[in-house]
Amino acid sequence: MKIGADIALQTRIDSTPEAVYRAISTADGVAGWFTTGAEIGEGVGALHRLSFPDAPMTWDFRIDQAEPGKRLAQTVIAGPPQWVGTELLYALEAHPEGGTLVRFDHTGFTEIDDMFREVTMGWAGMFMRLKEYVETGKPVPHFTV
């Protein structure tokens, strides 16, 4: 089906925005919930280069915005063709009842296909791991390379 498609998720994590930001923006953090194959650059223009088991290429995310404790925006510049050119945005804010509200958008997919459906479920599962990792401090990576 050819239409634009976006993924939007939201969760509350019982920790500070700064702790959540470290989990999404540092090598140790990303390895704690996403993939142990993480080479993570810092600052605008740097790359998050992610490896996955049995994948023939890395997924490279260029950092477009980096505001510690508030926002991380990235563009996918290498990986599966369906991903290239898509954008990821993590928006963080203190929740009024405590913890951090995490809003995540993965936008720019050009069609709904089997990969898009798998990615949607994949992000949901990874966000449960992000929450568990930040709240407990115990690594629970979705992918181990």
Image: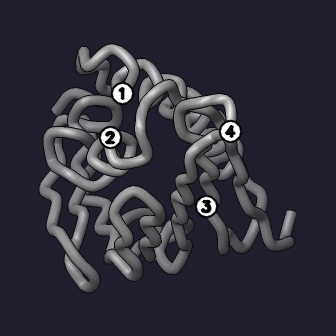
> Could you say whether the residue bearing mark 3 is in a helix, strand or loop?
strand
Instruction: Find residue 114 and report its horizontal and vertical position in percent.
Output: 69, 46
Q: CA distance from mark 1 to mark 2?
A: 7 Å
Which residue in the protein does label 3 denote? 106
Q: Nearer the viewer, mark 4 or mark 3?
A: 4
Report the amino acid beneath label 4. Answer: Pro
What amino acid is labelled 3 in the image?
His
Q: Is residue 78 visible?
A: no
Q: Residue at x 57, y 52 (%)?
A: 93
Count up the numbered dots.
Answer: 4
Look at the picture and state if 78 lies above or below 31.
Answer: below
Q: Are marks 1 and 2 in contact (CB under 8 Å)?
A: yes
Q: Which residue is mark 4?
A: 96
Return the disc, 1 or 4, that comes first in the chain's sequence.
4
Q: Secondary structure at mark 4?
A: loop
Nearest to viewer (mark 3 / mark 1): 1
Mark 2–mark 4 Cα distance, whole angstroms, equals 17 Å
Residue 71 appears left or right of 141? right
Residue tagged by mark 1?
134
User: Image point 63% across, 40% down: which residue?
Assistant: 95
In terms of sequence position, does the residue under pointer 4 or pointer 3 come before the other?
4
Q: Earlier in the sequence, mark 2 or mark 4?
A: 2
Q: What's the residue type where badge 1 is placed?
A: Val
**Rendered image: mark on residue 19:** 2
Distance from disc 3 to disc 1, alpha carbons, whole Å, reads 21 Å
Is residue 69 something that shows in the picture? yes
